[in-house]
Image (cartoon, helix red, strand yellow):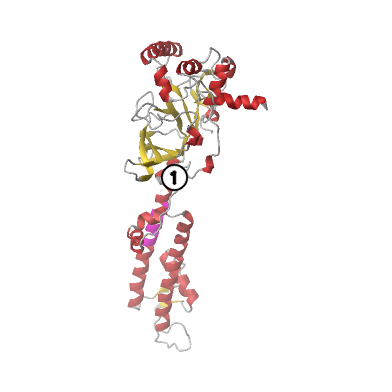
Amino acid sequence: MKRSQAARTSRRVTLDPVTRFLCMTPSPGPPYSDQGRSHSSCSRMFQDVSVQPKGHAGSKSRLVTKDGRCNIEFGNVESGNHLAYLVDVWTTFVEIRWRFVLLLFVVSFTGSWFIFSLLWYWIARSNGDMSARNRTEAHVMCIANVNSLTTAFLYSLETQTTIGYGGRAPTGQCGGTVAILILQSMAGVFINSFMCGVILAKISLPKRRAKTVSFSDTAVICLQNSKLCLLIRVANLRKTLLIGSQIYGKLMKTTTTPDGETLILDQLDIHFTVDSGKDNLFFVCPLTLYHVINRASPFYEISADTLPQQDFELVVFLDGTAESTSSSCQVRTSYIPQEIQWGRSFLPIISRTKTGKYSVDFSNFSKSVRVATPHCARCFEGTVDPGHQNRHEKKDNQKNQKKMGIRNLAFQVTDIHDIMDVTKM
């Protein structure tokens, strides 16, 4: 009981800026290991406030689900506005679900066959082709071997699908049969073209390409290039590239204006970048994107203690053009406060084999480890001398670049013995 009370008290301890800065610097040790950190009371208090609990990700309603679907519905729509869906009939048919497309496929063909079978039956009946008793030797039939509704339906199916078994055929002695034959042939071509177009358009929708782009399950907040940053990870599961890829974010939250007006789902811009630049990402391997938490960032006033109590949703967008189909696509996901981990960093997933190939280990794609991180952005700016730390950081980066032989520090280059399958997740 005393130990639990002491632990609670340690979490409520407020560190002065100097002590917090000292706690932020881990002692030397092997990377990604807790054994290399100092076991002093200062580091223990720092670890308590830096680790973000997982919480219940599904307890809060989302505007955008993890797979990119928008959780919104429209109510009290005027009846006249529903006609807009019929005016834009092509988009309506392309966007409806597959079950309705298959139902439309079956109904359109069978319905057209049955409707024209009624016309063929009416022509044969009005011409007296149904009953053989009332026929005379001079009787001329309009359609051969059509003497019931069933045979009329079979003749309609054979005509529209151009099967042509040869048992039933128009005699050419009635002008109405020629007109209906032309009309049904044109209707069959129109239905075939329309349904093939709808099915092909649904199969080739750009959002299908977006299924092979994956975001990390959680976001992390840690130091990146001597700056406090929010990091997310994104990967392209196909070997074909997304050309002109751009990534950006929107912070959705409820705000109150100075006039007292409450804005629900107010949108704030969140800018993401990588070491290689903000625009035109080279999306050949998984990328770690980061948002710098500075005075212009909406996360500037948030600390490790207040993050779980926040009420916002971070929506991340990735736009690009598929290299194989030249179609534009957009990938979306969202993160709520319970899915943002303070004081953690992603594990490296890119390595190099002895054969010279680069290998991606997707088992560590969303995994993170505990790292030393400031308690908040405000206290970090007040305790760190940017010029002094940047000079030391620049020297360390130059040494690491010379040692690893690379310029992009997003790659963790190591030698492994086994060749891994880079396409399996």
Disc 1 marks which amino acid?
Answer: Leu
Magenta range: 189-199
| Image coords of residue 303 (percent x, y) | 46, 28
Quarter-wise, where is residue 77 in the image?
bottom left
Quarter-wise, where is residue 90 in the image?
bottom left
Name the quadrant of the C terminus: top right
Residue 191 magenta-drawn? yes
| Image coords of residue 194 (percent x, y) | 38, 58
Name the one closer to the observer, 331 or 359.
Answer: 331
| Image coords of residue 158 (percent x, y) | 44, 67
Q: Residue at x 55, y 13 (%)?
A: 29
Quarter-wise, where is residue 269 in the image?
top left
Residue 245 magenta-drawn? no
**Left of 6 or right of it: where is 350?**
left
| 406 shown above or below 267 | above
| 229 shown above or below 192 | above
Name the quadrant of the N terminus: top right
Q: Residue at x 41, y 53 (%)?
A: 95
**Left of 262 or right of it: where is 366?**
right
Q: Residue furthest right?
A: 1
One can see residue 216 in this view: no
Q: Secondary structure at mark 1?
A: loop
| Image coords of residue 180 (percent x, y) | 35, 72
Check disc 1: other Cα within 10 Å, few if <14, some if 14-19, many if 20+: some
One can see residue 27 in this view: yes
Name the one closer to the observer, 249 or 172.
Answer: 249
Q: Which residue is mark 1?
A: 63
| 354 shown above or below 307 | above
How many marks overall? Answer: 1
Majority secondary structure of magenta residues: helix
